[in-house]
Amino acid sequence: MSIAHQEIATPILIGDIGGTNARFAIVPDASGAMIDFPIVQTKDFATIDQAIAQAVLPVSPVKPKSAIIAMAGPVDGDEIKLTNCAWVIRPRTLIADLGFGDVVVLNDFEAQALAVVALGANHLEKIGGGEAEKDAARLVLGPGTGLGVAGLIHSAGRWIPVPGEGGHMDIGPRTPRDFQVFPHIEKLDGRISGEQILSGRGLVNLYRAVATADGVEPRYTQPSEITIAGLSRSDPVAVETLSLFATCLGRTAGDLALVFKSQGGVFLSGGIAQKILPALKDGAFREGFDDKAPHRAWMSEIPIHVITHPLAALEGLAAYARNQSSFGVETHGRRWRA
Ligand SMILES: Nc1ncnc2c1ncn2[C@@H]1O[C@H](COP(=O)(O)OP(=O)(O)OP(=O)(O)O)[C@@H](O)[C@H]1O
């Protein structure tokens, strides 16, 4: 049997490393409850090694034999840089200094995709649609610091996460109002990608574009100020921004659902979707998603859920760590051994 198919030995340290926060837990074995640790701020530790050595190992009742780490950014070579954080993951150093026998590094949205088969209805808030088809493809997208996207395919008895760069697809104007607003959205190399709108930074871009289209002086600079003013309906530009954000998120989710034919359900992860839930439930988001002629009929049957679990990626990694043969996670080039 090749190394790639050997089980990763328990206890397994699992980690979800974001731009701001790093979340760690330990899966003791195939059936035991996950051991949680307090969330740490990446800026408080010079390296991931220090964070694990100081914030996890001294307070853990068990010593992990292996580690599975999910992070935002491409896994390429032995020095893995994170997109929005100064840490560099060096699996060989983790093995040498912390005694792991095995280190696997995955993409953060792969972990979100794995979570989609692990979370119960109590951690999901449904926004329309009918029943999910049991083994049909699923889709996860999460506006956060960036826009993460992953598919989840069921094939040959396994769930296979499909991470990609879907957050960088083009997004364009459609309605007459869009044609007034879109010329003012900040471009990246001349292009408006999904992430230029559907992220924290994107929310601010969109707000400024709506204000400029109406000749109004922008009042807010932070995503949270815009969502608070939009949800409380205290500022008309923020109200329209939130509604356009919901529409654009619906359209992009719908486009991706067409690609994957994700009749197993669409799942919105990350911090922003949870914070703007009322705006996602007011109809514009669902209409943006359903409005895909000639496929409106089956699109409107796809259930969409907002993931409300605060540690969804860790739940996904834990599900994989416990039951590795149920998931088709490709570890080639992403697994290092002592
Ligand atoms: N109330 C809010 N409304 C809208 N956007 C917000 C709000 N609060 C924070 N944000 C924005 O959300 C983004 C962070 O998203 P999220 O919480 O999903 O984190 P993340 O990208 O997963 O990173 P990490 O894993 O480090 O927490 C930032 O751009 C931030 O400005």
Image (cartoon, rainbow, N blue to C red):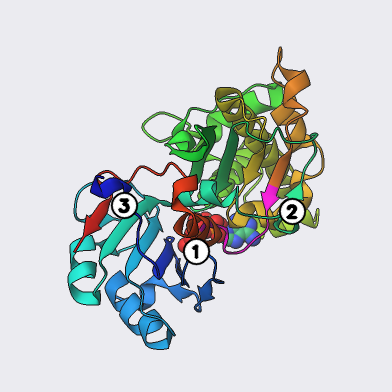
Q: Are the two marked residues, 1 and 2, in contact with CB atoms closer than 8 angstroms? A: no
Helix, strand or loop at mark 1: loop
Q: Are marks 3 and 2 in contact (CB under 8 Å)?
A: no
Residue 203 position, x and y percent, is 59, 47
**Image quadrant of residue 240?**
top right
Asked if residue 106 shows in the view, the reply is yes
Residue at 30%, 64% in the rendered image = 86
* Disc 3 Cβ-to-ligand 1 distance below 8 Å: no
Cα–Cα span, label 3 and label 1: 15 Å
User: Which element is circle 3 on?
Assistant: loop
Q: Position of residue 22 (x, y in %)?
A: 44, 68
Front residue of 212 and 8: 8
Q: Is residue 195 above or below residue 323?
A: above
Residue to which mark 2 is pinned: 121
Q: Amino acid at mark 1?
A: Ala
Dividing the image into four quarters, tell me where ligand 1 lies: bottom right
Q: For the residue marked with disc 2, what is the amino acid?
A: Ala
Residue at 35%, 59% (x, y): give it: 8
Give how far apart the Cα atoms at labels 3 and 2 are.
Answer: 32 Å
Q: Where does label 3 land, which residue?
A: 6
Mark 1 is surrounded, within 10 Å at the Cα level, by few (under 14), some (14 to 19) or many (20 or more) other residues, namely some
Range of magenta residues? 306-313
Q: Quadrant of the N terminus?
A: top left
192 horizontally vs 278: left or right = left
Which residue matches tag 1? 30
Dot 1 or dot 2, earlier in sequence: 1
**Would residue 262 appear left or right of 299 to someone viewing this image?**
left
Q: Amino acid at mark 3?
A: Gln
Left or right: residue 117 compared with residue 232: left
